[in-house]
Image (tube, grey):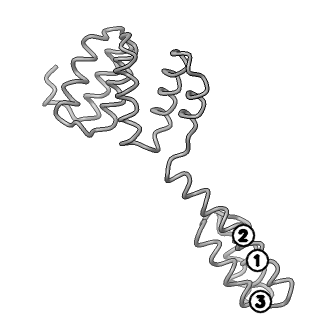
Amino acid sequence: MALRTLTPKQALEEVDARRRDGRLDSARDMAAQIVEQAPEFGPALHMLGLVEFERGETVAGEALMRKAIRLLPDSAEARANLGRMLTRAGRYREASMRSRAPSHRTRQCLHRRLLATTLLSWARREMDAGRLAEALAGFSRAEQLDPYFAKAHTGKGFVLYMLGDWPGAFREYEWRW
């Protein structure tokens, strides 16, 4: 099958099919061609690393998988495969850390949720003290940080209800529907 007639996705699917069929040398050759044409294509590096590992080239497979993870920091599959490689090599502690290490984006999301939770607590105190404008601002900011934070929507809806903005309050209560 000529590589240039396939899309990148089709080429990777073909490599994976060959790998699953046990044709590891053929899968390796095709994956290497893809990487040669696009050396920074993370999915191809991931697949080549997996094939190399299954061929018994553990050092090369691990190096390729690490490079793929640098290019695809949010790829849970690549992290899981690296963890599997490290486990098979007897490096259990590193396998545990590497396969679960959160990406930069995951850490950002956790930071945003923590900040939104802090703002939520502050907004509730403002609401309890009767400072509704400040509470509304706090709930709104928490909602901006994490649009799917139900407690921020509920708090904002409650403040809008207390301010007499019933349509706005119901919009916040029904935001998920």
Tell me if mark 1 has few (under 14), some (14-19) or many (20+) residues whose alpha carbon lies within 10 angstroms of its own.
some
| Lower sequence index among marks 3 and 2 | 2
Q: Could you tell me if the residues under marks 3 and 2 are in contact, i.e. CB atoms within 8 Å? A: no
Q: Position of residue 100 (x, y in %)?
A: 58, 37
Q: Which mark is residue 118?
A: 2
Mark 1–mark 3 distance (CA, rounded to whole Å): 12 Å
Which of the image's four quarters has the N terminus? Answer: top left
Q: Position of residue 71 (x, y in %)?
A: 36, 42
**Is 99 displayed left or right of 1 in the figure?**
right
Mark 3–mark 2 distance (CA, rounded to whole Å): 17 Å
Q: Could you tell me if the residues under marks 1 and 2 are in contact, i.e. CB atoms within 8 Å? A: yes
Q: Position of residue 145 (x, y in %)?
A: 59, 69
What SS does tag 1 mark?
Answer: helix
Q: Which mark is residue 83?
A: none
| Point 48% across, 32% down: residue | 77
Mark 3 residue type: Leu
Q: Which residue is mark 3?
A: 132
Mark 1–mark 2 distance (CA, rounded to whole Å): 6 Å
In this rendering, the answer to whether 51 lies above or below 143 is above
In this rendering, the answer to whether 55 lies above or below 16 is above
| Point 68% across, 74% down: residue | 172
In this rendering, the answer to whether 146 lies above or below 16 is below
Mark 1 residue type: Trp
Front one among 76 and 103: 103
Q: Which residue is mark 1?
A: 122
| Point 25% across, 24% down: residue | 31
